[in-house]
Image (cartoon, rainbow, N blue to C red):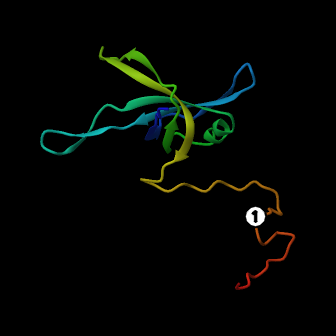
Amino acid sequence: MSEFTLTFEGNLAAKPELDITAGGQTLCRLRVAHNRRRRNGEGQWVDTTPMWVQVTAWGDLAERCAELSKGDTVAVKARDDLDVWPFNRQDGTLGGVLQVSAENVSVSMRFKGALPVADDKPAGDAWDPATADEPERELQPA
C-alpha cells in the first residue's frame, strides 16, 4: 500500500463559498494563495508568484469552513484527488490552479492568533461548571 500526503498553508483570497449539490451534499469552496519564498543569488528571501489552490471541503467540514473569512491563514491537508487547471495570465504566460479536496482544514496561528467566536448557545451549557446541574466535586487522592 502506498501513502500520499499533501499539506500546505496559505491565505484565503476570498470569502468561502458554501453550496449544496443537486444530490443534497454540502460543499464549501476555498480559494487559497500559497505564498512561495525563494532565496535569490545573494541569499536574500524573495517572494515569488503565489501558487493558487482551489480547495473543496465536504459535509460538516464544509459548514465549518464557511465560517472562515477572507485573509485567514489556513493549513490544508488534502486528499489524493489532485487536479490542475491551466490558464493564461494577462501577460501571456501559462499558469495553473491546483484543485484538491480537503481531508482537514485548520486555522494557522503561525503569524497571528485565532479570534474567539461569539457563543450563541443557550444558557445551561453542560460544559460550563457555573450552569451545570450537578455540583462540582473535588478529586480525592487515591
Quadrant in which residue 67 is drawn: top right
* Residue 71 visible, this orientation: no
Quadrant in which residue 40 is drawn: top left
From this view, report whether residue 94 is shown above or below residue 121: above
Horizontal side, residue 130 vs residue 49: left or right? right
* Residue 64 visible, this orientation: yes
> Horizontal and vertical percent for residue 52?
42, 29
- Residue at the extreme bottom: 141
> Horizontal and vertical percent for residue 64?
65, 42
* Residue at 70% across, 85% down: 141
* Residue at 52% across, 39% down: 70
From this view, report whether residue 21 is shown above or below residue 45: above
> Horizontal and vertical percent for residue 92?
30, 14
Decide: few, some or many residues near mark 1? Use Cα within 10 Å; few <14, some 14-19, many ≥20.
Answer: few
Horizontal side, residue 122 vs residue 59: left or right? right
Which residue, given by chain and number where applicable, does mark 1 sit on? 127
* Residue at 75% across, 64% down: 127
* Residue at 83% across, 69% down: 132
> Horizontal and vertical percent for residue 87?
40, 16
From this view, report whether residue 3 is shown above or below residue 110: above
| Residue closest to the eye, 47 or 128 | 128
Q: What residue type is labelled 1?
A: Trp
Horizontal side, residue 91 vs residue 56: left or right? left
Of the 4 image quadrants, the one containing the C terminus is bottom right
Horizontal side, residue 1 vs residue 34: left or right? right
| Residue closest to the eye, 64 or 68 | 64
